[in-house]
Amino acid sequence: MAQASLWRTALANFEQAADLLAGEVSPAALDRLRHPRERIELSLSPQLADGVPHVFRAFIVRHSDALGPAKGGIRMTDSVTLDDVTGLAMEMTWKCALIGVPFGGGKAGIVADPRRLGAADSEVVLRSFAHNATRHIGPQVYVPAPDMGTTEAGMGYIKDTLSFAAGLATTRGCFVTGKPVILGGIPGRREATGRGVAVTAAEALRDTGIAVEGATVILQGFGNVGAHAASIMASTGMRVLGVADLLGAVWNADGLDVEALVAHAARTGSVDGFDGGEAADPTELLTRPCDVLVPAAAANQLTAENAPAIQARIVAEGANGPTTPEADEILAERDILVVPDILCNAGGVFVSYLEFTQETQQEQMTATEVRRRLTRRMTERYGAARDLARRRSLSMRRAAMVKAVGTACEALAARGNLP
Ligand code: NAD
Protein backbone atom coordinates (compact mmCIF):
# COMPACT_ATOMS: atom_id res chain seq x y z
CA MET A 1 0.00 0.00 0.00
CA ALA A 2 1.28 3.48 -0.82
CA GLN A 3 2.45 5.47 2.20
CA ALA A 4 -0.38 7.71 3.32
CA SER A 5 0.58 11.37 3.05
CA LEU A 6 -0.23 13.56 6.02
CA TRP A 7 -2.48 15.55 3.71
CA ARG A 8 -4.52 12.45 2.84
CA THR A 9 -4.89 11.56 6.53
CA ALA A 10 -5.83 15.13 7.48
CA LEU A 11 -8.38 15.36 4.67
CA ALA A 12 -9.92 11.98 5.55
CA ASN A 13 -10.34 13.09 9.18
CA PHE A 14 -11.82 16.40 8.00
CA GLU A 15 -14.34 14.73 5.65
CA GLN A 16 -15.59 12.50 8.47
CA ALA A 17 -16.13 15.55 10.67
CA ALA A 18 -17.76 17.45 7.78
CA ASP A 19 -20.26 14.58 7.33
CA LEU A 20 -21.06 14.62 11.04
CA LEU A 21 -21.55 18.40 10.96
CA ALA A 22 -23.81 18.39 7.88
CA GLY A 23 -26.90 20.43 8.63
CA GLU A 24 -25.27 22.09 11.66
CA VAL A 25 -22.80 24.38 9.88
CA SER A 26 -22.80 26.06 6.49
CA PRO A 27 -21.50 23.96 3.59
CA ALA A 28 -19.68 27.07 2.35
CA ALA A 29 -17.72 27.31 5.59
CA LEU A 30 -16.78 23.64 5.32
CA ASP A 31 -15.66 24.19 1.77
CA ARG A 32 -13.46 27.11 2.80
CA LEU A 33 -11.82 24.89 5.42
CA ARG A 34 -11.34 22.05 2.94
CA HIS A 35 -8.91 24.20 0.96
CA PRO A 36 -5.73 25.69 2.41
CA ARG A 37 -5.65 29.45 2.25
CA GLU A 38 -2.06 29.88 1.13
CA ARG A 39 0.76 27.55 0.09
CA ILE A 40 4.16 29.14 -0.44
CA GLU A 41 7.22 27.48 -1.89
CA LEU A 42 10.65 29.03 -1.42
CA SER A 43 14.10 28.14 -2.63
CA LEU A 44 17.00 28.90 -0.34
CA SER A 45 20.61 29.21 -1.44
CA PRO A 46 22.65 29.65 1.73
CA GLN A 47 26.43 29.80 1.81
CA LEU A 48 27.50 26.63 3.62
CA ALA A 49 30.91 25.87 5.05
CA ASP A 50 31.94 23.67 2.08
CA GLY A 51 31.78 26.69 -0.26
CA VAL A 52 29.80 24.64 -2.83
CA PRO A 53 26.48 26.14 -4.07
CA HIS A 54 23.39 24.43 -2.56
CA VAL A 55 19.69 24.98 -3.07
CA PHE A 56 17.14 23.87 -0.45
CA ARG A 57 13.38 23.85 -0.95
CA ALA A 58 11.14 25.18 1.78
CA PHE A 59 7.39 25.54 2.24
CA ILE A 60 5.02 27.61 4.32
CA VAL A 61 1.33 26.77 4.45
CA ARG A 62 -1.37 28.84 6.10
CA HIS A 63 -4.38 26.58 6.19
CA SER A 64 -6.85 28.92 7.89
CA ASP A 65 -6.72 32.19 9.75
CA ALA A 66 -10.38 32.10 10.79
CA LEU A 67 -9.38 32.15 14.46
CA GLY A 68 -6.15 34.15 14.25
CA PRO A 69 -2.64 34.22 12.80
CA ALA A 70 -1.31 30.88 11.59
CA LYS A 71 0.56 28.89 14.22
CA GLY A 72 2.66 25.80 13.67
CA GLY A 73 6.17 24.42 13.76
CA ILE A 74 8.98 24.30 11.22
CA ARG A 75 9.85 20.76 10.19
CA MET A 76 13.35 20.24 8.85
CA THR A 77 13.85 16.78 7.40
CA ASP A 78 15.10 15.53 4.05
CA SER A 79 11.74 13.92 3.28
CA VAL A 80 9.25 16.66 4.15
CA THR A 81 6.86 17.49 1.28
CA LEU A 82 4.47 20.33 0.50
CA ASP A 83 1.58 17.87 0.94
CA ASP A 84 2.83 16.87 4.39
CA VAL A 85 3.14 20.51 5.41
CA THR A 86 -0.39 21.17 4.11
CA GLY A 87 -1.79 18.28 6.14
CA LEU A 88 0.08 19.41 9.24
CA ALA A 89 -1.14 23.01 8.76
CA MET A 90 -4.74 21.78 8.54
CA GLU A 91 -4.26 19.75 11.73
CA MET A 92 -2.93 22.89 13.43
CA THR A 93 -6.19 24.70 12.64
CA TRP A 94 -8.10 21.99 14.49
CA LYS A 95 -5.58 21.80 17.34
CA CYS A 96 -5.73 25.54 18.03
CA ALA A 97 -9.54 25.55 17.82
CA LEU A 98 -9.84 22.55 20.11
CA ILE A 99 -7.44 23.75 22.77
CA GLY A 100 -9.01 27.21 22.62
CA VAL A 101 -6.20 29.54 21.54
CA PRO A 102 -6.72 32.46 19.12
CA PHE A 103 -4.58 31.09 16.29
CA GLY A 104 -5.17 29.58 12.90
CA GLY A 105 -3.31 26.65 11.39
CA GLY A 106 0.08 26.92 9.74
CA LYS A 107 3.22 24.90 9.23
CA ALA A 108 6.57 25.21 7.50
CA GLY A 109 8.95 22.66 6.05
CA ILE A 110 12.60 22.84 5.03
CA VAL A 111 13.87 19.94 2.92
CA ALA A 112 17.20 19.32 4.66
CA ASP A 113 18.66 16.84 7.09
CA PRO A 114 19.97 18.72 10.15
CA ARG A 115 22.00 15.72 11.32
CA ARG A 116 23.90 15.52 8.05
CA LEU A 117 24.34 19.31 7.92
CA GLY A 118 25.69 19.62 11.44
CA ALA A 119 24.92 22.43 13.87
CA ALA A 120 26.71 25.29 12.10
CA ASP A 121 25.28 24.65 8.61
CA SER A 122 21.81 23.96 10.08
CA GLU A 123 21.91 27.41 11.64
CA VAL A 124 22.85 28.93 8.27
CA VAL A 125 19.96 27.11 6.52
CA LEU A 126 17.49 28.21 9.17
CA ARG A 127 18.70 31.81 8.94
CA SER A 128 18.37 31.64 5.16
CA PHE A 129 14.81 30.35 5.58
CA ALA A 130 13.93 33.19 7.99
CA HIS A 131 15.50 35.76 5.67
CA ASN A 132 13.58 34.48 2.63
CA ALA A 133 10.37 34.13 4.64
CA THR A 134 10.52 37.57 6.29
CA ARG A 135 7.28 38.68 4.61
CA HIS A 136 5.49 35.52 5.69
CA ILE A 137 6.42 35.46 9.40
CA GLY A 138 5.04 37.76 12.08
CA PRO A 139 2.53 38.06 14.91
CA GLN A 140 -0.26 38.91 12.48
CA VAL A 141 0.61 36.37 9.80
CA TYR A 142 2.41 33.20 10.85
CA VAL A 143 4.21 32.47 14.12
CA PRO A 144 6.54 29.45 13.85
CA ALA A 145 7.79 27.11 16.59
CA PRO A 146 10.04 24.03 16.67
CA ASP A 147 8.97 20.73 15.13
CA MET A 148 10.89 17.66 13.97
CA GLY A 149 14.45 18.63 13.14
CA THR A 150 14.30 22.13 14.64
CA THR A 151 14.97 23.18 18.20
CA GLU A 152 14.70 25.96 20.74
CA ALA A 153 18.11 27.26 19.62
CA GLY A 154 16.83 27.45 16.03
CA MET A 155 13.95 29.66 17.12
CA GLY A 156 16.52 32.01 18.68
CA TYR A 157 18.32 32.24 15.30
CA ILE A 158 15.04 33.03 13.54
CA LYS A 159 14.24 35.78 16.01
CA ASP A 160 17.74 37.20 15.57
CA THR A 161 17.55 37.05 11.74
CA LEU A 162 14.21 38.87 11.69
CA SER A 163 15.45 41.54 14.11
CA PHE A 164 18.56 41.99 11.97
CA ALA A 165 16.43 42.38 8.82
CA ALA A 166 14.39 45.09 10.57
CA GLY A 167 17.52 46.85 11.84
CA LEU A 168 16.32 46.46 15.42
CA ALA A 169 17.76 44.95 18.57
CA THR A 170 14.70 42.77 18.85
CA THR A 171 11.42 42.00 17.11
CA ARG A 172 8.36 43.86 18.37
CA GLY A 173 5.65 41.44 19.38
CA CYS A 174 6.05 37.72 19.22
CA PHE A 175 7.42 36.46 15.88
CA VAL A 176 8.33 32.97 17.01
CA THR A 177 7.59 30.73 20.00
CA GLY A 178 9.58 27.92 21.58
CA LYS A 179 12.66 30.15 21.73
CA PRO A 180 15.21 30.24 24.56
CA VAL A 181 13.88 31.79 27.80
CA ILE A 182 16.66 34.39 27.72
CA LEU A 183 15.19 35.72 24.43
CA GLY A 184 11.61 35.99 25.66
CA GLY A 185 10.79 32.28 25.68
CA ILE A 186 8.68 30.77 28.41
CA PRO A 187 9.69 28.30 31.10
CA GLY A 188 8.07 24.91 30.54
CA ARG A 189 7.66 25.21 26.73
CA ARG A 190 10.28 22.53 26.07
CA GLU A 191 8.38 19.91 28.05
CA ALA A 192 4.87 21.20 27.27
CA THR A 193 3.90 18.75 24.53
CA GLY A 194 5.14 15.77 26.54
CA ARG A 195 3.36 17.06 29.64
CA GLY A 196 0.11 17.38 27.70
CA VAL A 197 0.52 13.80 26.47
CA ALA A 198 1.02 12.62 30.05
CA VAL A 199 -2.01 14.59 31.31
CA THR A 200 -4.38 13.29 28.61
CA ALA A 201 -3.06 9.72 28.94
CA ALA A 202 -3.82 9.85 32.69
CA GLU A 203 -7.35 11.11 31.94
CA ALA A 204 -7.83 8.28 29.43
CA LEU A 205 -6.62 5.74 32.01
CA ARG A 206 -9.17 7.03 34.54
CA ASP A 207 -11.91 6.83 31.89
CA THR A 208 -10.94 3.26 31.12
CA GLY A 209 -10.96 2.29 34.80
CA ILE A 210 -7.20 1.67 35.00
CA ALA A 211 -5.22 3.12 37.91
CA VAL A 212 -2.61 5.66 36.86
CA GLU A 213 -0.23 4.34 39.50
CA GLY A 214 1.42 1.28 37.99
CA ALA A 215 -0.13 1.67 34.50
CA THR A 216 2.26 0.34 31.85
CA VAL A 217 3.54 2.41 28.93
CA ILE A 218 5.39 1.81 25.67
CA LEU A 219 6.70 4.76 23.67
CA GLN A 220 7.92 5.13 20.11
CA GLY A 221 10.18 8.19 19.79
CA PHE A 222 12.42 9.58 22.49
CA GLY A 223 12.94 13.12 21.25
CA ASN A 224 11.36 16.27 22.60
CA VAL A 225 7.88 14.79 22.91
CA GLY A 226 8.67 11.16 23.80
CA ALA A 227 11.40 11.77 26.37
CA HIS A 228 9.44 14.43 28.27
CA ALA A 229 6.24 12.38 28.13
CA ALA A 230 8.13 9.35 29.48
CA SER A 231 9.71 11.33 32.35
CA ILE A 232 6.45 12.95 33.39
CA MET A 233 4.48 9.70 33.08
CA ALA A 234 7.08 7.93 35.23
CA SER A 235 6.94 10.76 37.78
CA THR A 236 3.18 10.23 38.13
CA GLY A 237 3.65 6.53 38.90
CA MET A 238 3.27 4.94 35.46
CA ARG A 239 5.76 2.24 34.51
CA VAL A 240 7.58 2.76 31.21
CA LEU A 241 8.33 -0.75 29.95
CA GLY A 242 9.65 -0.08 26.46
CA VAL A 243 10.99 2.73 24.30
CA ALA A 244 11.86 2.62 20.59
CA ASP A 245 13.61 5.19 18.45
CA LEU A 246 15.13 5.28 14.96
CA LEU A 247 18.22 3.35 15.98
CA GLY A 248 16.88 0.71 18.36
CA ALA A 249 14.60 -0.18 21.24
CA VAL A 250 14.92 -1.11 24.88
CA TRP A 251 12.63 -3.13 27.14
CA ASN A 252 12.43 -3.80 30.87
CA ALA A 253 9.41 -5.74 32.15
CA ASP A 254 9.91 -4.22 35.63
CA GLY A 255 9.94 -0.66 34.27
CA LEU A 256 12.82 1.34 32.81
CA ASP A 257 14.70 3.91 34.85
CA VAL A 258 13.54 6.80 32.65
CA GLU A 259 15.95 9.43 34.02
CA ALA A 260 18.90 7.10 33.38
CA LEU A 261 17.54 6.45 29.87
CA VAL A 262 17.24 10.20 29.23
CA ALA A 263 20.88 10.63 30.28
CA HIS A 264 21.96 7.70 28.07
CA ALA A 265 20.08 9.09 25.05
CA ALA A 266 21.51 12.58 25.64
CA ARG A 267 25.00 11.07 25.68
CA THR A 268 24.68 8.66 22.75
CA GLY A 269 21.87 10.10 20.63
CA SER A 270 19.65 7.01 21.01
CA VAL A 271 18.02 4.63 23.49
CA ASP A 272 19.97 1.85 21.77
CA GLY A 273 22.61 0.23 23.96
CA PHE A 274 21.00 1.26 27.27
CA ASP A 275 22.13 -1.21 29.91
CA GLY A 276 19.07 -0.83 32.15
CA GLY A 277 17.02 -3.19 29.97
CA GLU A 278 17.25 -5.64 27.10
CA ALA A 279 17.42 -4.73 23.42
CA ALA A 280 14.18 -5.21 21.47
CA ASP A 281 12.94 -4.95 17.93
CA PRO A 282 11.59 -1.39 17.50
CA THR A 283 8.72 -2.50 15.23
CA GLU A 284 7.68 -5.49 17.31
CA LEU A 285 7.79 -3.41 20.51
CA LEU A 286 4.67 -1.52 19.40
CA THR A 287 2.60 -4.71 19.55
CA ARG A 288 3.58 -5.81 23.07
CA PRO A 289 0.86 -5.66 25.77
CA CYS A 290 0.63 -2.39 27.72
CA ASP A 291 -1.97 0.03 29.03
CA VAL A 292 -0.80 3.04 27.02
CA LEU A 293 1.03 3.09 23.71
CA VAL A 294 2.50 6.49 22.86
CA PRO A 295 3.55 6.95 19.24
CA ALA A 296 5.74 10.06 19.57
CA ALA A 297 7.93 9.79 16.49
CA ALA A 298 6.88 9.95 12.87
CA ALA A 299 3.59 9.79 10.90
CA ASN A 300 1.90 6.60 9.67
CA GLN A 301 3.34 4.25 12.27
CA LEU A 302 0.06 2.51 13.13
CA THR A 303 -1.20 1.05 9.88
CA ALA A 304 -3.67 -1.55 8.58
CA GLU A 305 -0.78 -4.05 8.89
CA ASN A 306 0.09 -3.65 12.57
CA ALA A 307 -3.18 -2.26 14.03
CA PRO A 308 -4.73 -5.75 14.38
CA ALA A 309 -1.75 -6.75 16.56
CA ILE A 310 -1.71 -3.72 18.90
CA GLN A 311 -2.31 -4.90 22.46
CA ALA A 312 -2.55 -1.51 24.19
CA ARG A 313 -5.78 -0.38 25.87
CA ILE A 314 -5.08 3.26 25.01
CA VAL A 315 -3.15 4.93 22.18
CA ALA A 316 -2.03 8.45 23.12
CA GLU A 317 -0.91 10.19 19.93
CA GLY A 318 2.13 12.28 20.81
CA ALA A 319 3.19 12.48 17.15
CA ASN A 320 1.21 14.17 14.40
CA GLY A 321 -0.69 11.74 12.19
CA PRO A 322 0.82 8.51 13.59
CA THR A 323 -2.34 6.50 12.76
CA THR A 324 -3.52 5.98 9.19
CA PRO A 325 -7.27 6.26 8.57
CA GLU A 326 -7.41 2.46 7.98
CA ALA A 327 -5.65 1.73 11.27
CA ASP A 328 -7.95 4.16 13.03
CA GLU A 329 -10.99 2.11 11.93
CA ILE A 330 -9.35 -1.10 13.11
CA LEU A 331 -8.44 0.33 16.53
CA ALA A 332 -11.98 1.69 16.95
CA GLU A 333 -13.48 -1.71 16.10
CA ARG A 334 -11.13 -3.30 18.63
CA ASP A 335 -12.33 -0.85 21.28
CA ILE A 336 -8.89 0.66 21.79
CA LEU A 337 -9.25 4.24 23.02
CA VAL A 338 -7.27 6.60 20.78
CA VAL A 339 -6.54 10.05 22.22
CA PRO A 340 -6.14 11.92 18.91
CA ASP A 341 -3.09 14.03 18.09
CA ILE A 342 -5.04 17.30 17.85
CA LEU A 343 -5.90 16.87 21.54
CA CYS A 344 -3.08 14.73 22.93
CA ASN A 345 -0.15 16.80 21.65
CA ALA A 346 -1.79 20.24 21.89
CA GLY A 347 0.13 21.12 25.07
CA GLY A 348 2.94 22.61 22.99
CA VAL A 349 0.73 25.05 21.14
CA PHE A 350 -1.11 25.98 24.33
CA VAL A 351 2.15 26.97 26.03
CA SER A 352 3.22 28.70 22.80
CA TYR A 353 0.10 30.81 23.22
CA LEU A 354 1.18 31.67 26.79
CA GLU A 355 4.59 32.64 25.38
CA PHE A 356 2.89 34.79 22.73
CA THR A 357 0.79 36.67 25.28
CA GLN A 358 3.76 37.00 27.64
CA GLU A 359 5.89 38.59 24.93
CA THR A 360 3.25 40.80 23.36
CA GLN A 361 2.19 42.04 26.81
CA GLN A 362 5.75 42.18 28.20
CA GLU A 363 4.81 39.96 31.13
CA GLN A 364 6.74 37.16 32.76
CA MET A 365 5.23 33.83 33.75
CA THR A 366 6.71 31.33 36.15
CA ALA A 367 7.19 27.63 35.42
CA THR A 368 4.64 26.76 38.12
CA GLU A 369 2.02 29.02 36.59
CA VAL A 370 2.64 27.59 33.12
CA ARG A 371 2.38 24.02 34.40
CA ARG A 372 -0.84 24.76 36.29
CA ARG A 373 -2.52 26.45 33.32
CA LEU A 374 -1.41 23.72 30.93
CA THR A 375 -2.68 20.90 33.13
CA ARG A 376 -6.00 22.65 33.69
CA ARG A 377 -6.56 23.38 30.00
CA MET A 378 -5.60 19.89 28.80
CA THR A 379 -7.87 18.27 31.40
CA GLU A 380 -10.78 20.56 30.53
CA ARG A 381 -10.50 20.03 26.78
CA TYR A 382 -10.03 16.28 27.15
CA GLY A 383 -13.22 16.23 29.24
CA ALA A 384 -15.16 18.27 26.67
CA ALA A 385 -14.14 15.93 23.82
CA ARG A 386 -14.87 12.86 25.94
CA ASP A 387 -18.34 14.17 26.87
CA LEU A 388 -19.17 14.89 23.25
CA ALA A 389 -17.89 11.43 22.24
CA ARG A 390 -20.22 9.84 24.79
CA ARG A 391 -23.19 12.02 23.92
CA ARG A 392 -22.97 11.33 20.19
CA SER A 393 -21.44 7.82 20.37
CA LEU A 394 -18.32 8.89 18.51
CA SER A 395 -14.67 7.97 18.79
CA MET A 396 -12.53 10.56 20.58
CA ARG A 397 -10.96 11.52 17.26
CA ARG A 398 -14.30 12.19 15.63
CA ALA A 399 -15.60 14.07 18.67
CA ALA A 400 -12.45 16.22 18.83
CA MET A 401 -12.69 16.92 15.10
CA VAL A 402 -16.39 17.80 15.30
CA LYS A 403 -15.63 20.28 18.08
CA ALA A 404 -12.64 21.77 16.29
CA VAL A 405 -14.17 22.04 12.83
CA GLY A 406 -17.41 23.34 14.35
CA THR A 407 -15.46 26.07 16.18
CA ALA A 408 -13.60 27.12 13.01
CA CYS A 409 -16.93 27.24 11.12
CA GLU A 410 -18.43 29.39 13.88
CA ALA A 411 -15.52 31.85 13.56
CA LEU A 412 -15.94 31.98 9.78
CA ALA A 413 -19.67 32.64 10.15
CA ALA A 414 -18.98 35.40 12.71
CA ARG A 415 -16.56 37.07 10.30
CA GLY A 416 -19.21 37.19 7.57
CA ASN A 417 -18.47 37.19 3.87
CA LEU A 418 -16.08 39.41 2.02
CA PRO A 419 -17.51 40.75 -1.22
P1 NAD B 1 12.35 14.87 17.70
O1 NAD B 1 13.06 15.05 16.41
O2 NAD B 1 12.81 15.59 18.91
O3 NAD B 1 12.31 13.29 18.08
C1 NAD B 1 11.83 12.31 17.21
C2 NAD B 1 12.09 10.93 17.86
O4 NAD B 1 11.43 9.94 17.08
C3 NAD B 1 13.55 10.51 17.91
O5 NAD B 1 13.77 9.75 19.07
C4 NAD B 1 13.70 9.61 16.68
O6 NAD B 1 14.76 8.67 16.79
C5 NAD B 1 12.36 8.94 16.69
N1 NAD B 1 11.91 8.42 15.38
C6 NAD B 1 11.78 9.11 14.23
N2 NAD B 1 11.32 8.30 13.26
C7 NAD B 1 11.15 7.08 13.83
C8 NAD B 1 10.70 5.82 13.35
N3 NAD B 1 10.33 5.66 12.08
N4 NAD B 1 10.66 4.79 14.22
C9 NAD B 1 11.03 4.94 15.51
N5 NAD B 1 11.46 6.10 16.02
C10 NAD B 1 11.52 7.15 15.19
O7 NAD B 1 10.82 15.20 17.36
P2 NAD B 1 9.69 15.69 18.37
O8 NAD B 1 9.71 17.18 18.44
O9 NAD B 1 9.75 14.88 19.61
O10 NAD B 1 8.38 15.32 17.53
C11 NAD B 1 7.90 13.99 17.45
C12 NAD B 1 6.50 14.03 16.87
O11 NAD B 1 5.66 14.84 17.68
C13 NAD B 1 6.38 14.61 15.46
O12 NAD B 1 5.33 13.95 14.78
C14 NAD B 1 5.97 16.05 15.71
O13 NAD B 1 5.29 16.63 14.61
C15 NAD B 1 5.06 15.86 16.89
N6 NAD B 1 4.86 17.07 17.70
C16 NAD B 1 5.91 17.71 18.27
C17 NAD B 1 5.68 18.83 19.07
C18 NAD B 1 6.79 19.53 19.79
O14 NAD B 1 6.49 20.43 20.60
N7 NAD B 1 8.04 19.17 19.59
C19 NAD B 1 4.37 19.30 19.25
C20 NAD B 1 3.32 18.60 18.65
C21 NAD B 1 3.58 17.48 17.89
Image: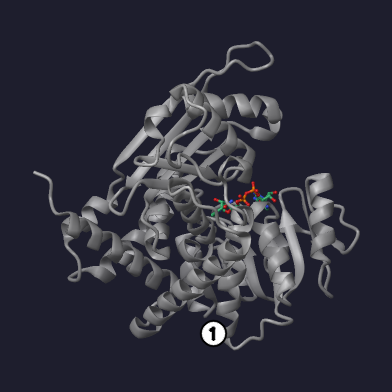
Outermost left residue: 419
Along the horizontal axis of the image, is 111 left or right of 96? right
Outermost right residue: 275
Q: In this view, does 309 lie above or below 128?
A: below
Q: In this view, does 168 lie above or below 139?
A: above
Residue in the foreground of this view, choosing between 41 and 170: 170
Residue 57 can be seen in this image: no
Outermost bottom residue: 209
Along the horizontal axis of the image, is 257 left or right of 120? right
Residue 371 can be seen in this image: yes
Which amino acid does the dot numbered 1 rest on?
A: Asp
Q: Position of residue 14 (x, y in %)?
A: 34, 60
Q: In this view, does 323 lie above or below 337?
A: above
Count the numbered circles shown.
Answer: 1
Task: State the colouring used for the structure image.
Answer: one colour
Q: Where is residue 407 in the image (x, y as percent from the top left)?
A: 29, 64
Q: Where is residue 119 in the image (x, y as percent from the top left)?
A: 70, 30
Q: Residues within 10 Å of mark 1 (few under 14, many from 20)?
A: few
Query: Going 66% across and 24% down the picture, which residue do you hit?
Result: 121
Figure quadrant of residue 306 = bottom right
Q: Name the residue under label 1.
A: 207
Callout 1: CB less than 8 Å from ligand 1? no
Query: Going 28% across and 66% down the picture, which residue do you hit?
Result: 406
Along the horizontal axis of the image, is 116 left or right of 43? right
Q: In this view, does 164 lie above or below 251?
A: above
Along the horizontal axis of the image, is 277 left or right of 286? right
Q: Where is residue 74 in the image (x, y as percent from the top left)?
A: 51, 40
Query: Going 35% across and 36% down the picture, which residue do you hit?
Result: 39
Secondary structure at numbered mark 1: helix
Query: Going 37% across and 82% down the picture, which residue do you hit?
Result: 393
